[in-house]
Amino acid sequence: MIKLHVAALIAVLFHLPADAQTPVTQPPGLPRPPGTASAGQAVRRLLVGLDANPKASTKYKRGDWRESIKLMKTTGANQFHYAKVWSEVEPRPGDYELDDVRFISEESSPLPVAFNLRVLDAGARNMPDAYKSLAWDSPEMIRHVTAVVEALGPVLGPRPWSYAIGNEVDMYFATRPAEVPAYARMLQQVKVRVRALHPYAGFTVSFQSSAAPQMKMLYAPIFALLDHVAFTYYPLGADFMVRPPTSAPADVAAMLAAVQPLPVMLQEVGYPTAALLGSSPELQRVFIQQIFDAVQAQGTSRILSMTYLFQADLPEWFINEIVKAYGLTSQTFRAYVSTLGLRNERDEPKPAWNEFAARAKKLGPNR
């Protein structure tokens, strides 16, 4: 069974959640992988992804993932966002479990990968317990992070075009701002090894879009190390109520303004459909329309990629685990968790499914 970690998945739900030899232009200053467009070729393709979680009637076993990834490939998606919690890869110090990574890598081939090693996720350190008390910039911590990057290296190979260390890290640093400089010092060391193993991958860290105004202030030590900035984006208000889908253009412009001159990757975008949240399947479709329009208006020199979460609404058993893990029992939270997919609990396409596929195919898979 593919281990889809509850904390790893639910992190996406709080400004909320998986590989490459297709042509892809890398961020400025990075070498180009074989087969990419030449420097004089006009415009790079927008990399579009769809998180390929299985349909709600399944138990998320390998056959379910194989089926869901195959379905995802029919949409015109031309990249694959893949994230792994550190403690899933290294459940015990020095013991690396790579079978799931290898399986997903094989099934998603040949799509380029935006990979995230979730050293931080859901506001917590997600690593073997023996490492949790280490300072970020201690030689021991740097050695351990480097070791897991090296263990993953042969499996991921040349396919990552983006490599992130940490998911929505602002959830953690919001209450621990003094740790930001040490985390940056760790990143500075680990980046050297990431670049050596994956020379075609831009280096990044994932933040919630709400952290954008702090990128050059609180997060300046991290920002200084990035090739591009990864954001997760869900237009929500209080109590998980949706904001209008027409918020997307201004929100995207604000993210770009906050991090200029670096480009942005929209690691995750999503919009629930529950009526309880003031939403509907039609509003989700409009959101897909609006976010594609906003991204294309900015151009691929400013926005490198965009991935929608999720392909399918989550199964009830998984929703129950998420509710239990976070202790959030409100009906609005449950409605949010339940309805982010582009396909409903019966695996029927919502209007946004066809909208996504039409827009992705229009851009061209560039394979």
Image (spheres, grey):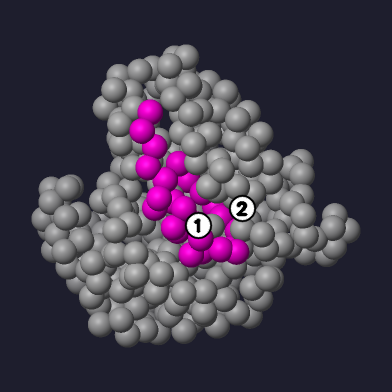
Name the quadrant containing residue 175: top left
Between 1 and 231, the one lying in front of the other is: 1
Q: Please name the amino acid that badge 2 sits on.
A: Arg
Between 302 and 194, the one lying in front of the other is: 194
Q: Please name the amino acid that badge 1 sits on.
A: Ser
* Depicted 213 relative to depicted 135: above or below: below
Kindly identify the residue that appears in the image at 29 percent across and 58 percent down: 1
Label 2 packing within 10 angstroms: few (<14), some (14-19), many (20+): many
Q: Residue 133 at what x, y percent from top left?
A: 30, 19
**Residue under circle 1?**
105
Is 12 positioned to the left or the right of 185 in the image?
left
Between 1 and 274, the one lying in front of the other is: 1
Q: Residue 61 at what x, y percent from top left?
A: 29, 64
- Sequence-wise, which precedes: disc 1 or disc 2? 1
Kindly identify the residue that appears in the image at 74 percent across and 42 percent down: 30
Q: Residue 19 at what x, y percent from top left?
A: 54, 57
Label 1 packing within 10 angstroms: few (<14), some (14-19), many (20+): many
Give me the C-alpha separation between circle 1 and circle 2: 9 Å
Is residue 67 at all visible to an observer of this figure? yes
**Quadrant containing the C terminus in the rendered view:** bottom right
Is 116 positioned to the left or the right of 125 in the image?
right
Q: Are marks 1 and 2 in contact (CB under 8 Å)?
A: yes
**Residue under circle 2?**
159
What's the magenta region?
94-117
Kindly identify the residue that appears in the image at 56 percent across and 43 percent down: 154
Is 281 positioned to the left or the right of 357 in the image?
left
Q: How many marks?
A: 2
Residue 101 magenta-drawn? yes
Is residue 286 at all visible to an observer of this figure? no
The secondary element bearing badge 2 is classed as: loop
Residue 237 magenta-drawn? no
